[in-house]
């Protein structure tokens, strides 16, 4: 179908952009990086638009056979296929389906936005922009990989640029935050890789063939022992849960966000957190659909169904993350904690194992990417514009910084799920799925509790808006400025997109819905849109 | 109307939406439109209003229009047609009537704003938000499904928030905006849950499809759940007890906003929602309608009692709005579908007039306090006269519009068999006395007696403000008469849902009434209104300012009552106390737990690993003799723990290989 290896081209162009940004003279680094990011974005846009080119995503084929990979590429890498002592079966395998495509698009979009926002970065710009593009290589690799080995390599690539972004360009406690981020998520990755190796060896034992391919292992997974699968699921889930992050594995996140430079925070919230949720859906759900509906017993204690455990963690994240936002004084920390709450909604949506709930979760991932990116940017702008992010020290900004204020209002409204903006339909569909799976009040994971998150979310945003933007202006004796031109363009552009995907959510749902319903039917959850 | 022309009706919500978008686009490009934004809004709203009138003319003359619909989101369903979220408009009698009322009032109030808001620094914001609001309200009225209704509902909530906080440098306005958003949000969550349950019960959000399917659902408790969840949304939006606390504070917004959003239109959305969902309510377990009736009836008397004591003219009107909304819910709850909508329409006219008139007075004396007014009738004849008509009308004096609908409501209560209809009837009747009293108290305090020194230089407002007020006096006086004799409203409305017969059959289960009882009830209603008027005349009119409720303050038990009313039954304090004394300490504790507990554990593991590493590091001294000692120690350890024989063999082997000798 595709003559052009478009996905590889995206990776190569990102890497080339990183190299170029490192090599060009300092004052061109931002412009060169932005040029490459725009190029990659435009390519991914062509990929997403129906029928634009030969390498565009085929929506019709996707709804006929949802989890069939499109634009796939497969080349042997660490493999001696055909030899008598066949070893390793590691291939460079990439491809997309309707579940990964929104994430690919989100990654290129938000990387471009982050680079444009930070284009005037004065401190070591070559390395700064180079690292942002290296990160893009990593996340695009994660969202397109179809081989565990490739997946894991890209997964680890992402860590390194983020570590340096926090450690070099970060705030006063950057060393602490960077190390904590690295070690915490790396420990999680190591546990994940133990799970992956166990899977590969079990597959080898069952089939006699080395393979790291997602598809091969998913094919032999039904023959694996249910307890073994439960253990592997737990290992993988731990890796993903730290990344998402799920309460109680979340404490690296506020530290990392508070210290990270704005562009780093944007990519962290908008894209990196999605890797965890995406991994859960792509690997854990599709390889072990049966684990989700199994009730394990652990040292004689009968546990609920695995999906209910996930749902419970989702509910805890939603409520815990939302409540703790009410106590924050640092605006950036507030936004950071709100991500925990919103990613909890993603976990909850997936755990319903209903088609509508999973497609809502994917939409929520996309929407949260746009919205949290915009929120971190506007908080960065407030910090630049006023010299502080401390809520009690702010006040009445709407009078002096009307544009900043307007952006903060719209982004907050989007984040609290206002209809017409991006995250409303995702909330509605997630809760619809939740009702199908768990009812209204009959169990601890019924929708009655998580839906209260909607209310608490409104409370912390509206309260923060009141304290930051409204009331009498607090004179701080500092020069203040409204949005500079590049920040203005980026933020207004993001707001337009937030409104666009709110008014036309089908743009994302048309990609994600068929695959979500297919995953749901693999698991044996409800597949109907209603009833 | 030709079929393709029907698509023009999308302009009803979208003409104002486009104006909203255009104003902000210009603002983003650095061009503040100022007063021109007002003219643009007026054009946008004018288009919508005109279309809404045309639609009403068509629908009332029996032309069937629409519905028009587009697919929004589609989900696959196993073995059936895909399930869809749709966006669509429907033009039945209910939406045509309410839409026309909203359209006309929106136009008049936008016109009024041109005068009232002139010179404000945030004019472009104001008109952008007003336009967005009007589009959303009309979109809600004409929508043909719950999802679109909810979307419009939330957009209105946003506009309400932004407009209450229009003077956002004032801390009170900012606080009131926050309160309005959060309190209504409680109701919105209920509505949202209702949406989820509706979708999972019916597989659609369309009113018509649900109306057809609802008869086939035997689980009346499920229907009651849905109905009550929707009603929860209505309680928030229409500010019924216990979520009534936001509306009086919302008066911090500009007066045209109070007139349009917090009196005539948005707060009616809850009533409209219940009316729209009437098939659900009627088929549900009677607990649903009973709850509606009781919440409405209680709010009517409860809010009216608070309206007795305040001096802020807008605040009195706000409590009055709460009380009148309570009447509407009471009507719907006892089965008086047409009475509820009838009162909705009448109230929209006279309450919009009252707010706009109050705005003119505030404009004239630069204060909301009625004690700063007084004697304005001589200075502002047109406004005073129009306000008098509206006051008479809301009090329910015979033949004026409020009389028709209020009597119909009281009659419906009397005839219904709802749980303790007798108490509800008493609530309704007593509220009528209170209404007449506080409304005439307001009118006398404002327009009667001798002017306070603030009011001495008051002059009539400019024509853009007076003309809409005077124009509104016509429907405020006559809408009841016209609706009954020209439109034949009860038939008109019940034909719209195609459920007249069905409805009355259902209501038969509630109770039976008699004609003589009905007549007695009507007469009693009018007597009560006159009674209230008379008391107000005695206390505030005849001997202006001599003897009035404020003197109760120092009178023993009456003083307690007075202070209770003045403190709004302490309910606001209760809510604030809950937030500051329960929620805030809780989240602070949680934040400490997060830092000290969870993160403390994480850091504790890290420090333990670090400490282990630090102590093990001492083993790596770099001194060869230490390593040699370690090797010997290791060998000894293996010898002790492991098999000594094997060790001996191993040493032998080692010796033979390396040194060429051994055993």
Image (cartoon, rainbow, N blue to C red):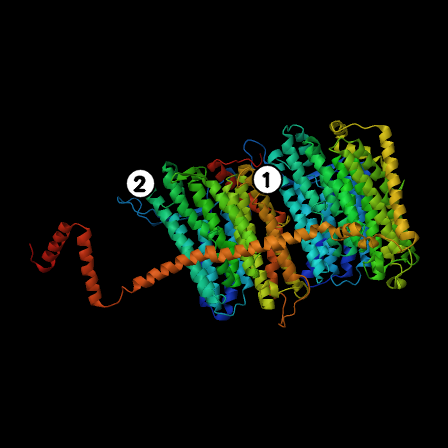
Q: Please, what secondary structure does the residue beneath circle 1 have?
A: strand
The spot of residue B362 in percent (x, y) is: 83, 58
The answer to whether residue B148 of the structure is visible from this angle is yes
Residue B539, placed above or below residue B219: below
Categorize mark 1 by other alpha carbons within 10 Å: few (<14), some (14-19), many (20+). some
Q: CA distance from mark 2 to mark 1?
A: 44 Å
Please give the residue where the numbered disc 2 appears in the rendered image. A205
Instruction: Identify the chain of the residue marked 1, using the numbered disc in the image.
Output: B
* Mark 2 on the same chain as mark 1: no
Looking at the rendered image, the quarter that the N terminus of chain B falls into is: top right
Q: Please, what secondary structure does the residue beneath circle 2 have?
A: helix
The spot of residue A404 in percent (x, y) is: 63, 62
Q: Residue at x 78, y 45 (%)?
A: B323
Q: Is residue B421 left or right of residue A411?
A: right
Please give the residue where the numbered disc 1 appears in the rendered image. B74
Q: Is residue B91 left or right of residue A516?
A: right
Q: Is residue B73 left or right of residue A350?
A: right
């Amino acid at each position: 179908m595709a003559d052009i290896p478009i996905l590889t081209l995206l990776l190569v162009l990102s890497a080339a952009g990183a190299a170029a940004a490192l090599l060009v003279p300092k004052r061109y680094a931002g412009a060169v990086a932005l040029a490459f990011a725009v190029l990659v974005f435009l390519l991914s846009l062509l990929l997403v638009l129906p029928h634009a080119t030969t390498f565009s995503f085929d929506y019709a084929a996707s709804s006929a056979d949802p989890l069939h990979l499109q634009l796939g590429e497969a080349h042997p890498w660490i493999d001696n296929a055909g030899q008598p002592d066949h070893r390793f079966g590691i291939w460079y395998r990439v491809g997309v389906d309707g579940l990964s495509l929104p994430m690919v698009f989100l990654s290129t979009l938000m990387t471009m936005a982050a680079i444009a926002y930070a284009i005037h970065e004065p401190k070591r710009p070559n390395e700064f922009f180079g690292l942002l593009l290296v990160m893009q290589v990593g996340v695009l690799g994660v969202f397109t990989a179809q081989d565990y080995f490739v997946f894991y390599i890209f997964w680890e690539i992402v860590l390194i640029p983020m570590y340096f972004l926090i450690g070099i360009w970060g705030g006063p406690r950057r060393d602490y935050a960077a190390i904590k981020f690295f070690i915490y998520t790396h420990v999680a990755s190591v546990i994940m890789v133990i799970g992956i190796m166990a899977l590969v060896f079990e597959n080898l034992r069952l089939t006699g063939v080395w393979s790291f391919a997602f598809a091969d292992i998913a094919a032999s997974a039904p023959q694996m022992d249910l307890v073994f699968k439960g253990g592997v699921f737990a290992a993988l889930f731990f890796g993903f849960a730290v990344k998402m992050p799920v309460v109680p594995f979340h404490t690296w996140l506020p530290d990392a966000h508070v210290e990270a430079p704005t562009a780093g925070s944007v990519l962290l919230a908008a894209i990196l957190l999605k890797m965890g949720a995406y991994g859960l859906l792509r690997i854990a759900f599709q390889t072990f659909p049966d684990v989700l509906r199994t009730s394990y017993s652990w040292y004689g204690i009968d546990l609920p169904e695995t999906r209910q455990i996930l749902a419970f963690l989702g509910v805890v994240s939603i409520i815990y993350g939302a409540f703790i936002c009410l106590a924050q004084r640092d605006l950036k920390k507030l936004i950071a904690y709100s991500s925990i709450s919103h990613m909890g909604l993603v976990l909850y949506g997936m755990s319903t194992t209903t088609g509508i709930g999973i497609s809502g979760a994917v939409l929520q991932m996309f929407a949260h990417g746009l919205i949290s990116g915009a929120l971190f940017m506007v908080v960065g702008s407030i910090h630049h514009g006023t010299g502080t992010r401390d809520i009690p020290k702010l006040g009445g900004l709407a009078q002096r910084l009307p544009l900043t204020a307007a952006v903060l209002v719209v982004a907050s409204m989007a984040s609290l799920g206002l209809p017409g903006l991006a995250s409303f339909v995702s909330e509605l569909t997630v809760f619809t799925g939740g009702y199908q799976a768990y009812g209204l009040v009959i169990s601890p994971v019924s929708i009655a509790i998580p839906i209260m998150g909607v209310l608490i979310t409104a409370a912390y945003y509206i309260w923060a808006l009141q304290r930051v933007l409204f009331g009498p202006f607090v004179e701080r004796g500092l020069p203040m400025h409204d949005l500079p031109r590049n920040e203005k363009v980026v933020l207004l552009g993001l707001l337009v997109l937030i409104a666009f995907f709110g008014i036309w959510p089908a743009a994302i749902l048309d990609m994600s819905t068929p695959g979500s319903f297919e995953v749901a039917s693999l698991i044996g959850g409800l597949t109907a849109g209603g009833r | 109307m030709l079929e393709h022309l029907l698509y023009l009706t999308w302009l009803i919500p979208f003409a104002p939406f486009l104006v909203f978008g255009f104003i902000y686009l210009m603002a983003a490009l650095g061009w503040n439109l100022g007063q021109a934004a007002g003219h643009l809004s007026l054009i946008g709203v004018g288009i919508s209003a005109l279309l809404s009138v045309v639609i009403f003319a068509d629908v009332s003359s029996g032309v069937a229009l629409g519905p028009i619909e587009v697919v929004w989101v589609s989900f696959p369903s196993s073995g059936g047609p895909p399930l869809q979220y749709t966006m669509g408009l429907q033009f039945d009698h209910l939406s045509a009537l309410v839409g026309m009322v909203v359209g006309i009032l929106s136009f008049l109030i936008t016109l009024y704003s041109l005068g009232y808001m002139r010179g404000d620094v945030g004019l472009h914001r104001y008109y952008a938000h007003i336009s967005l609001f009007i589009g959303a309200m009309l979109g809600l009225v004409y929508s043909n499904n719950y999802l679109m209704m909810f979307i419009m509902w939330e957009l209105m909530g946003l506009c309400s928030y932004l407009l209450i906080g229009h003077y956002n440098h004032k801390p009170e306005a900012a606080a009131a905006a926050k309160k309005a958003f959060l309190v209504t949000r409680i109701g919105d969550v209920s509505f949202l849950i209702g949406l989820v349950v509706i979708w999972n019960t019916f597989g659609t959000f369309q009113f018509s499809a649900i109306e057809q399917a609802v008869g086939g659902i035997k689980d009346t408790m499920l229907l009651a759940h849905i109905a009550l969840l929707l009603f929860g949304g209505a309680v928030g939006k229409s500010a019924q007890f216990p979520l009534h606390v936001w509306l009086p504070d919302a008066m911090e917004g500009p007066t045209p906003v109070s007139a349009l959003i917090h009196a005539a239109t948005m707060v009616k959305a809850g009533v409209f929602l219940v009316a729209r969902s009437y098939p659900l309510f009627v088929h549900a377990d009677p607990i649903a309608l009973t709850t509606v009736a009781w919440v409405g009836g209680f709010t009517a008397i409860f809010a009216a009692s608070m309206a007795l004591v305040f001096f802020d003219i807008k605040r009195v009107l706000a409590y009055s709005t709460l009380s009148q909304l309570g009447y509407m819910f009471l009507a719907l709850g006892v089965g008086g579908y047409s009475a509820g909508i009838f009162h909705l329409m009448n109230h929209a006219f006279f309450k919009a007039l009252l707010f706009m008139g109050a705005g003119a007075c505030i404009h004239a004396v630069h204060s909301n306090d009625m004690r700063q007014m007084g004697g304005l009738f001589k200075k502002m004849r047109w406004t005073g006269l129009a306000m008098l008509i509206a006051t008479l009308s809301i009090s329910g004096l015979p033949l004026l519009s409020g009389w028709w609908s209020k009597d119909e409501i009281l009659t419906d209560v009397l005839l219904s068999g709802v749980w303790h209809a007798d108490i509800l009837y008493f609530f309704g009747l007593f509220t009528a006395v209170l209404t007449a009293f506080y409304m005439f108290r307001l009118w006398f305090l404002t327009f009667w007696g001798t002017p306070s020194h603030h009011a001495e230089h008051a002059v009539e407002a400019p024509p853009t403000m007076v003309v809409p007020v005077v124009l509104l006096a016509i429907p405020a006086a006559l809408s009841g008469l016209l609706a009954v004799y020209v439109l034949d409203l009860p038939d008109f409305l019940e034909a719209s849902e195609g459920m007249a017969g069905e409805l009355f059959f259902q209501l038969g289960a509630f109770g039976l009434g008699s004609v003589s009882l009905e007549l007695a009830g009507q007469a009693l209603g009018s007597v009560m209104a006159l009674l209230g008027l008379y008391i107000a005349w005695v206390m505030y009119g005849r001997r202006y300012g001599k003897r009035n409720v404020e003197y109760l303050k120092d009178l023993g038990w009456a003083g307690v009552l007075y202070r209770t009313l003045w403190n709004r039954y302490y309910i606001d304090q209760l809510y604030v106390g809950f937030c500051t004394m329960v929620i805030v300490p809780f989240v602070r504790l949680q934040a400490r737990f997060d830092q000290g507990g969870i993160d403390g554990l994480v850091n504790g593991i890290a420090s333990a690993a670090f400490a282990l590493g630090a102590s093990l590091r001492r083993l790596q001294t770099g001194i060869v003799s230490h390593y040699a000692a370690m090797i010997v120690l290791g060998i000894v350890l293996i010898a002790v723990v492991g098999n000594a024989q094997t060790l001996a063999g191993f040493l032998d082997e080692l010796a033979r290989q390396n040194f060429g000798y051994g055993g």
